[in-house]
Amino acid sequence: MRHNETRNVTLLSRIVNRIILFLYRWKGWKIEGHLPKHLKKYVIAGAPHTSNWDFVFFAGATHHEQVQPNFMGKHTLFQGMMRNFMLDMGGISVDRTKKANTVDQMKAEFERRKELALVMAAEGTRSSDGKWRSGFYNIAQAAAVPIVPAYADNENMIIGFGEPLIPSGNYGEDLLKLAQWFRSQMPDYDRFKVLEAQAKAIIEGRNDV
């Protein structure tokens, strides 16, 4: 995995990465589609988010694709002995006490880095009924980077990547395109049906989130 800082990687992060790759390979996960080789910066919108294991298997899949995944973390996690470990794992410190909001902070990160593949759980929390939060979209639009859809089929142990989507500024229409792709991959999955209904409701003006 590639890292953005030129320093020695911590022993702990090397051990954790090896454990992640072992678990990914041991479970026998398969990949459908690929991350875009011609792009250096994008937001990976992952769904569904149903388990803490999601990160492990997404990290394994991105390693297979030779991409360093990045994720946002509360700034207090990047203090003391944990700082270098969190950075090694791809963490990006976000300080919600700053005047600049999360979107502005991530826009600045995209601007200063040559490469950044930001993985986001588009549903926000594991308790979601399938509706997505707009944070992933707002960040991609502000940073002027594409959105790469990614799904995890835990039953069949498949992680799939779709074609990049450039945000048009019409959230409802773009969300519907993403929802239709997710539905095409897992047609009977209830949470993706909810996502499609959410997108249609936004387009019709019945829902703005």
Image (cartoon, rainbow, N blue to C red):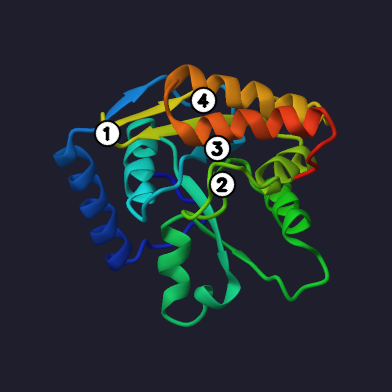
Q: Distance between the residues labelled 1 and 4?
A: 15 Å
Label 1 crowd (10 A; few <14 / some 14-19 / many >=20): few
Which of the two discs, 1 and 4, labels the residue nearer the N terminus?
1
Q: Distance between the residues labelled 4 and 2?
A: 13 Å
Of residues 208 and 119, which is closer to you in this image? 208
Residue 182 numbered mark, or none: 4
Q: Does the rendering let one see residue 167?
A: no
Of residues 104 and 188, which is closer to you in this image? 188
Question: For the residue marked with disc 2, what is the amino acid?
Answer: Glu
Q: Give x and y (percent) for residue 97.
A: 74, 76
Question: For the residue marked with disc 1, what is the amino acid?
Answer: Glu
Q: Is 10 on the left-hand or right-hand side of 23? A: right
Q: Is 198 on the left-hand or right-hand side of 130? A: right
**Which residue, as the protein is rendered here, is positioned at the far bottom?**
80
Q: Distance between the residues labelled 1 and 2?
A: 19 Å
Residue 123 numbered mark, or none: 2
* Residue occupied by mark 1: 155
Question: For the residue marked with disc 4, what is the amino acid?
Answer: Phe
Q: Give x and y (percent) for residue 79.
A: 52, 79
Q: Is mark 3 on a helix, strand or loop?
A: strand
Seen in the picture, residue 168 relative to 116 is either above or below; the reply is: above
Q: Give x and y (percent) for residue 66.
A: 39, 34
- Mark closer to the observer (3, 2): 2
Q: What element carries label 1?
A: loop
- Mark closer to the observer (3, 1): 1
Residue in the picture at 61% in, 35% down: 42
* Residue occupied by mark 3: 44
